[in-house]
Image: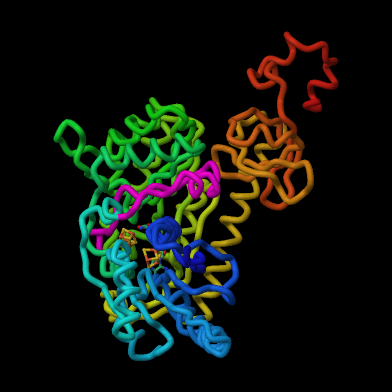
Amino acid sequence: MTPPRKLHIKSYGCQMNAYDAQRMVDTLAPEGFVETASVDDADLVILNTCHIREKASEKVYSELGRLRAVKDEAARKGRHMNIAVAGCVAQAEGSEIIRRAPVVDVVVGPQSYHHLPQLLARAKSHGRALETEFPVEDKFGFLPAPRPDAIRARGISSFVTVQEGCDKFCTFCVVPYTRGAEVSRPVAKIVDDVRRLADNGVREITLIGQNVNAYHGEGPDGRTWSLGTLLRRVAEIPGIVRLRYSTSHPRDVDETLIDAHRDLPALMPFVHLPVQSGSDRILAAMNRKHTVSNYRRVIDRFRAARQDIAFSSDFIVGFPGEAEEDFLATLALISQIGYAGAYSFKYSPRPGTPAADMQEMVSAAEMDERLVRLQELIDSQQSAFNAAAIGNTVDVLFERAARNPGQIVGRTAYLQPAHVMASPDIIGQVLPVTIASLERYSLLGELATSAQAQGAPATFSPMTTSQMTTGA
Ligand code: SAH
Ligand code: SF4
Ligand code: F3S
């Protein structure tokens, strides 16, 4: 038997890339590849790249510079190391990578991962290989399923891609060019994938897509299913206790999704709903296809369906033409909505996107200053949101042993990490935790008794009033 070959994969960017990285590992497993955490002893290194902002794509070339030294060192020891570039930079700049970086053996776009074994073989016989064809309908249908041991090793929470690509064409964004047009996977294939995951210990599923609520996959009844209908079906799969989805576009929130939040206890009341800006003028220039008031109405509909729902968002500061008053409108929107958290970015012009040709650039100093102000506001909202958990008893899905001995860490419905002292047996279970304190972004607490969990300590426990008010 030939010894296993070692694969080191480094993923940047979004959840789709993280999921794709796992699927590349699954694709190469039948070829005899096993994952290694160290780049030095790898036979194959894959950089799974992101093109979303300039900084993200620049990283690729500096990383390739470092890899050249590692590859040379391996060659000195008589070992051949292959280097592959995958992901959105591969898609956008494939031939440039081949030209600029002779160290690269394979360039593979996000729609071609099922061809990785052939591409490696081609690189061996012809020196180098490039494939950036797209789109492929449900490329995941061509990939070998993950092995049970791989699923178990990855833990109790898993992503499943249900949709890929985007037809929205926001003027700042590369995704419609790097991932192509929206493609939805058929319901039956998603259900099969989730079943396999659940059978091997996965308890939480996050359905992912670049624009996940544009999902319009073929249902088993031959009709087109929406994300809300798909969530209902996935919620029925035995073993799945929590469901999430990401990332949504405000324009594509339909009644089935709102109803799913109303009806499905497994669907977590935490929605990432990027708005980018609070100014209608800027939203129009971004081609977001929604106004501020459309967005507020969508938030209200979610809140009407589920009172405990919380939101996070993405913001871009310094989009071309953004004046101080536009930025103030963004701050005002943030104050009105009240977020549990958000990602914020300085606008980065991307080659080939319409916004890259827009004239009125905001100065770097102004962008820096706006980003600080926006992040201060978001941080204060996030801290208040986290602090509000103290003293409450909340459900936590336990994921793994924490760094501190004896501690187990899980997540609340709002993805806040929560730590308790407990036996590892609780991993995979949802249990009520009484939150005692907050340490940076982590909640610390104790497993609640079932009486506390039901919110009825006064009747069932012999506590004194003073104990009750201190939450003992
Ligand atoms: N499909 C998702 C996420 C796209 S990328 C969505 O529509 O929300 C994630 C985030 O990166 C975006 O929401 C946006 O805030 C940010 N982003 C995208 N392009 C950018 C650019 N050119 N400059 C700065 N931020 C950008
Ligand atoms: Fe990019 Fe806009 Fe599509 Fe999101 S909705 S992926 S920001 S084009
Ligand atoms: Fe980046 Fe591509 Fe995702 S550009 S954010 S890896 S879709």
The spot of residue 158 in percent (x, y) is 47, 46
Is residue 36 left or right of 244 when viewed as pictured? right
Q: Can residue 155 be seen here? A: yes
Q: Viewer-proximal residue, 204 or 449?
A: 204
What span is in magenta?
A: 143-169
Is residue 216 left or right of 305 when viewed as pictured? left
Q: Viewer-proximal residue, 207 or 347?
A: 207
Q: Quadrant of ligand 2?
A: bottom left
Is residue 55 left or right of 216 when viewed as pictured? right
The spot of residue 203 in percent (x, y) is 50, 36
Q: Residue at x 35, y 48 (%)?
A: 295
Residue 119, quarter of picture:
bottom left
Q: Residue furthest front?
A: 1
Residue 73 lies in the magenta-colored region = no
The spot of residue 132 in percent (x, y) is 26, 73
The spot of residue 73 in percent (x, y) is 57, 87
Residue 255, quarter of picture:
top left
Q: Viewer-proximal residue, 169 or 64?
A: 64
Residue 90, quarter of picture:
bottom left
Residue 167 lies in the magenta-colored region = yes
- The quadrant the C terminus occupies is top right
